[in-house]
Image (cartoon, rainbow, N blue to C red):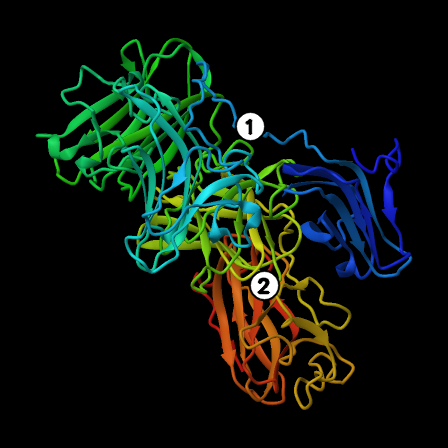
Amino acid sequence: QIFSSFFSPGHYIAYFPVEQVSHIQSELMQPNSQGCLEFWYYMHMWAYVDKLKLTVYVNESGSLRSLWNLTGDQGAVWHQATVYYTSSVQHQIVFEVARPKLDDGVIALDDIYTSCSALDLTTPAPTTEATSPPPSSMDCNFQEGLCNWVQETEDGFDWNRQMGGQLNEPWLGPLYDHTLKNDYGFYLIANMSDDKTGETAVISSPLTISNTDVCIRFWYYMLGPSVGTLDLILETVKFSVNRITGGTGFIAIDDLSVTAGACEDHNPCGFESPSLCGFESDVTDDSVWLCVDGSSGHIDHTYRAELGHSMAVLGAELQKPEVTKLLTPEYTSSTESCLRFWYWLSAGTSDSLSVHILRNGELDPALWDLSGAPSHSWEVAEVTISSPSKFRVAFRAKLSPNPKSFVLLDDISIKSGACSATGSCDFESGQCTWVNAANGVSDQHDWIHIDGHFRGPLVDYTTHTADGKFLLSLSQINTRGQNSRSVLISERIVLTTDSCLDFWYHINGSDPGILRVLLDSDATEQDVLFETRVTGNIWKNASITVAKTKPFQIHIEAQAVKEGFIAVDDIRLTQGPCEDISVESGVFPGSDFETDTCQWKDISVGQFVWQRDKNGTITANTGPSVDHTTGTELGWYMTVEASHGDHNSYAALQSTAMKDASNECLFEFYYHMFGEGIGELKVFLQEGQRKTPLLWMSGNHGDEWHRAELGVGRTHQVFTLLFEATRTYSELGDIAIDDISFLNCNLPGTYRSNTPALISYS
């Protein structure tokens, strides 16, 4: 512990408004390749919060290098921070605080340590019970260098040793290594961004093990729309990467190990050993499951390579429709276990795959089944299984003879404990069945499974701690200057009733990105369920009713911009439509805006907003000089000022949530659109995340108020009404509204017709 003279029990060090910038520093410390600083901080201030700043530096021979910084009010609570760093020379840790000279507010520090109990400085031990093989001279985690691996001299470019803390953008390399799992651990990386097709980067090591079989283990990370290839070549042992023209992205490797003997299949089983992990075809079937490699035309899931293996039933091998079962080894009784597997089901309408428990030769009803929903790549599924006695799991494939029909299985595992509910995950133990889309045109960087010690929110939503896990998309512009997005995909879901999708999201940044939720029931069609740009340094909730439909997948898409991040947590899919118990039936919020905005709220993003005003706007000769309610300069209305924001901006004014409107419900208001270069005024009926346009107007309507009456009609969900206004390049035109009211909306009512009311305005 450093600064010990300040931190006796019950005390802390604090900075009060004496000077604008202040420093404290540690004693002189020795070089450290794996340094870790842990401390608690308190930052609270009522005014000028943007001037409140705490920065941590390392002082190396008089040169300050920033390690960590935070700006703004963090609330009246203590927060913990962990900072990893390296320094090759003697150094000091420096804390710098900056704030304005005011009487309120404080920055405080406590419990500062220069060794972190959570920091694991070694490669994690294997999870198997077998004794670990002795290390070889070829093993390397790259924390201290290349070990016994050398750069080839006759290749086109080199691998680089790098750590995530050196990066500003996620497409320049992994933001953390595999060994330490933080941004100060090292790995090897090859940058693919070049125009020289066929250029290679090669590292090699002599093979020092004389056995016939050797097992080479390594972790790799490949990201980019055209990232090239990674090859493992057994001459000596070489890792080679190949560039392609116009390539973008990178390939990284970490934690290499080489041991004598063939690699063993672990849990999950990837079918790479001759034993097939004890799996076998049911001898009572007429056809069998085949262990195939990439030469069959089907790439496995484990290695995604031609030499990788998976289990398959191929329609090209069948003479007639067949039912074929693949059986796991026999297991003892189980109260609850989670079966996880990857599958690929072809497009045949009669093809199907189902999962059953097999006990005493009898097949139980299906626990999971899928048909009529072709896969376009490998997909994941989880099933909770239980049995009071010994059992096997049976994968039952039904397939017709067709050269294009097939069923594939790979990477099957069983672990104790129930699976997460379908489509649900709190991300504390992994990503459940939510996976990143394959990199391509629609997906240019991945969601990252991370905690609050990294970038993004300081805490997750589940545990409200920095150690809690969530999924993070770093919102950036890619190397081609285009908006970059991440796409997260659920398992394939089959609903028997309408269900509620509920999740928490966190969007932050000066120029926020867009978070979308889409329902994908067909490769050619996607329905938008939810879309938002709303930012704020808090977790927000969204609930969406998902209608019963054919098998579908949910896509959560974060579309990036220049700065900021988007995070999601606690995704839940539960039976029954979403309920909004806070919405009172039969309450419809009219307003004349004379005293306040009533139950109408501006939800605009940026400076172009709806505001309550009177007697014209700040731009000369624009805006109403009188309101509609009183007809005087003293009356109030809602308006948008065209001199604010830019020409791409839109302002949004939303009502409170309503429900149980009659079939004859009408929405009435008065509008004023006057000046040059008037933008557009739109009115939407919003049910969940579906927006139905009721009115769309533009242009100069003169210096007078006009009445509009719109049909709302009977709605089957909670709904809101939304005014959206846009602006043009001109600053000489404004849009205003006044005297909002609802007519004939309360139940019961006289239902003359089920057809929507006509839109009319004058």
Task: Report if residue 91 is visible in the image.
Answer: yes
Mark number, residue 122? 1
Dot 2 surroundings within 10 Å: few (below 14), some, or many (20 or more)? some
Sequence-wise, which precedes: disc 2 or disc 1?
Answer: 1
Where 6 falls versus 69 (above or below)?
above
Residue named by callout 2: 511
Callout 1, which amino acid? Thr
Quarter assignment of residue 233: top left
Q: In which quarter of the image is the C terminus?
A: bottom right
At horizontal 88% and vertical 36% (from top left) the residue drawn is 5
Report helix, strand or loop for mark 1. Answer: loop
Quarter assignment of residue 293: top left
Where 331 falls versus 153 (above or below)?
above
Estimate the x, y position of residue 522 in percent, counting from the top left.
32, 49
Residue lying at the far left of the rendered structure: 319
Estimate the x, y position of residue 528 in percent, counting from the top left.
44, 55
| Disc nearest the viewer among 2 and 1 | 1
Task: Report if residue 400 is visible in the image.
Answer: no
Dot 1 surroundings within 10 Å: few (below 14), some, or many (20 or more)? few
Where 704 falls versus 125 (above or below)?
below
Callout 2, which amino acid? Asp
At horizontal 22% and vertical 42% (from top left) the residue drawn is 347
